[in-house]
Amino acid sequence: VVSTQSTGITNNLSVMMKATLLVLFLALCQVSWSAKCKNIYRKSRCETYVQKNRCNANAAVENCQKTCGLCADKKEEEREDAIVIEEEEDAIEIEEEEDAIEIGEAVEEESAAKQSRAQPQPADIHPEPQQPECMDLQPDFVCISSRDRGECYNSLTASRCRKTCLMC
């Protein structure tokens, strides 16, 4: 009788352990299943499976769980949707900031290019020569003889014999 009772208790423990293990296994599968509930394919491709009623295809089951509604936990799916939307909004903000920076750089480059293409002003083409101090660049005898011949009104003589021709 004792052996029958101990066998019965052992069987009961074995059944309880198996049931406990089964419950734990199912709980882990549920957690694992819901944590992996996402689209691997891009959304437009997954939506094609839905439109063609092909969510039972192996590729859709493995790669489009979210779009095909194959997720076990709807709350997890909604939380992931919120995270994806937040990430997309952040990405859009970053893109907008980058676009603004690129536009600003392009405007600066265009402005610099316009300035470099600007027509030079007359002063830029032939700038006035710097007025040297009042002195002759030619030897005295050359300047004096040029002055005596009345050549001070010649621009070359006037620039080279400034002191002798009284140009300063």
Image (cartoon, helix red, strand yellow):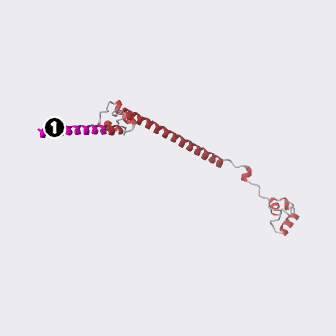
Q: Main secondary structure of the magenta part?
A: helix
Q: Position of residue 3 (x, y in %)?
A: 12, 40
The quadrant the N terminus occupies is top left
Residue closer to the observer: 125 or 100: 100
> Residue 83 appears at what percent x and percent y?
44, 37
SS at badge 1: helix
- Above or below, 51 relative to 120: above
Residue that badge 1 annotates: 8
Q: Residue at x 51, y 39 (%)?
A: 93
| Range shown magenta | 1-29
Of the 4 image quadrants, the one containing the C terminus is: bottom right
| Residue drawn at the location 82% of the way across and 69% of the way down | 139
Mark 1: amino acid: Gly
Examine the image and state in which quarter residue 130 appears. Answer: bottom right
Residue 58 screen position, x and y as percent:
29, 37
> Residue furthest toward the right?
148
The total of numbered circles placed on residues is 1
Q: Specify whether residue 71 is painted magenta.
A: no
Determine whether, in the image, residue 130 is placed left or right of residue 165.
left
